[in-house]
Amino acid sequence: MARVTAMALGPLDVPIEAHPDALSIADLYDEVQGALASAFPRSRQLWVRGEIQHVADQHGRAGHCYLDLIDPETSRDRMAPALKVKCWRSTWGPLRATLAQEGVVLEPGMVVVLRGTLDFYRPKAEVGFVLAELDVTSLLGRLAAARAALLRTLASEGLLERNRRLPVPEVPLRIGLVASPGTEGYRDFLGQLTASGFAYSVTVAPVRVQGADAPAAVAGAVGRLARAADRFDLFVLVRGGGSKADLAAFDAEPVARAVATSPVPVWTGIGHTGDESVADLVANRACITPTECGREIAQRVAAWWESSVVGPAALMSQRAADLLHREELHHDGTRRRLAGTARHLVDRQRDHIVKRADVLVRCAPRVVEDAQSTVVARAARLGPLAEGALRREADGLDGWRRLLAAYDVERQLERGYTLTLDADGRIVRSARDLAPGSLVVTRFADGTARSVVEEVNEVSPQRSMTKRPSEASEASEASEARGEADTATEMNDAKEGSR
């Protein structure tokens, strides 16, 4: 296999005379520039249409602006032809002011129509375009058409009226605020709430409200608040006055969709009087300024306070005062009637007391005499009654004494009875309680005797119930004693009852 070796030759390796028609780079560029100048002289103004692919605004530095344009039809083609556009500071300054006044910000994706001249930049061998004029009218028409198309899309999806149909609470005190802290619109809005005197709870979602990244930032802030919708009564989107370009973020589709689909009513206060953004059109309510938005919220709460608190309180106070007045009049009348009735009753009672006093004065001597007679009579009866009562009590005591004597153990022993005890001192009440060999103690009136049981003979119950004459007499005596005691007791009870 043959090997091919490439060798770079130095500038002196090939004689110049070998290619007498070779051009230097400068000569080549001269011919290119001459050809371009012949075909596109500086006096020839060209109109070019293209889609912005990149924007480099050096407003804060050199003051120039650089654009990269491509054909709109080939925007997705990586090999699409591109045109470098230069707009020098002297042209870009006034043009930028005009665009800002009309609310236009050049952004990638916009299709523009430019007028200018062709230019060849030798250090980079770059064919460019020097911008002299931008067709703002056609650009505004396209922006207006894009806005109208966005509104039609939102209407077809039912989003223009969606947020407006959400009910706003009567007392919107919990507010989610989307704004740029420290700006005039932010201060104006909060100033109205503070001046109202009501206790608002304001949660701020800080965002940039202008610039290329403003639409995404504003839509994202509304989305973050919406994720905690149960914590809020109302969302508020405010931005102070500015040019149309400064307010362009609120015409963007992401912001419009975020406001329209919010689960919480959204109020807007954007710009000055006459400014109306797409966000205003899809919001629940659009106020002309941040100050007006804060004032509307404060007035809504104040109206509820007046109708639901102050008004009923004043009505209740008035009714209470009227009721108290009527009750005072009624009490005064009642007091007078009671006083008159009391005086009449006192007079009647006074007359009655006087009459009763006269009767007492007349009847007192007779009553005293009757009482004295009654006392004397009762005193005369008291002595015999007391003596009789004492005699009866003595008779009763004698009867009880005889009854006790009839049941006295010692007296029974004196009559010849004995008590038989076992070895433990317990009374032996039946022959069945004894057994041969048992030790018994027999108690007499004059002593005791110990003995041992040799035999136990039981008798029938009929024979055991036969009483000896002495037993019968003792039982009769006890019965008579009980009868006397009971008779004495009954007589005493009868006499006490008669008294």
Image: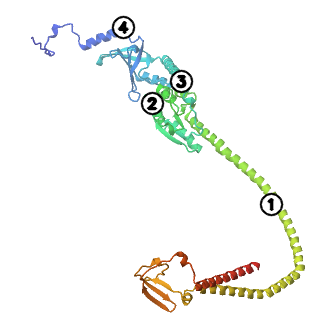
Viewer-closest of 103 and 197: 197
Q: Observer-nearest residue: 262 or 336?
A: 336
As helix, strand or loop, the secondary structure at mark 2 comes to helix
The reply to whether dot 1 and dot 3 touch (C-beta < 8 Å) is: no
Q: Which mark is residue 214?
A: 2
The kind of residue tagged 2 is Ala
Residue at 82% across / 61% down in the picture? 338
Mark 1 vs 2: CB contact within 8 A: no
Q: Secondary structure at mark 4?
A: helix
> Are dots 4 and 1 in contact, CB under 8 Å?
no
What colouring does the structure picture have?
rainbow
At label 4, which amino acid type do we have? Ala
Query: 171 or 247, which is in the foreground?
Result: 171
At numbered mark 3, what does the secondary structure look like: helix, strand or loop?
loop
Name the residue type under label 3. Gly
- The answer to whether residue 276 is visible is no
**Residue 258 image point, x, y percent:** 48, 29
The residue under label 1 is which amino acid type? Arg
* Mark 2 → mark 3, Cα distance in angstroms: 25 Å
Residue 39 marker: 4
Residue at 57% x, 29% y: name it: 165
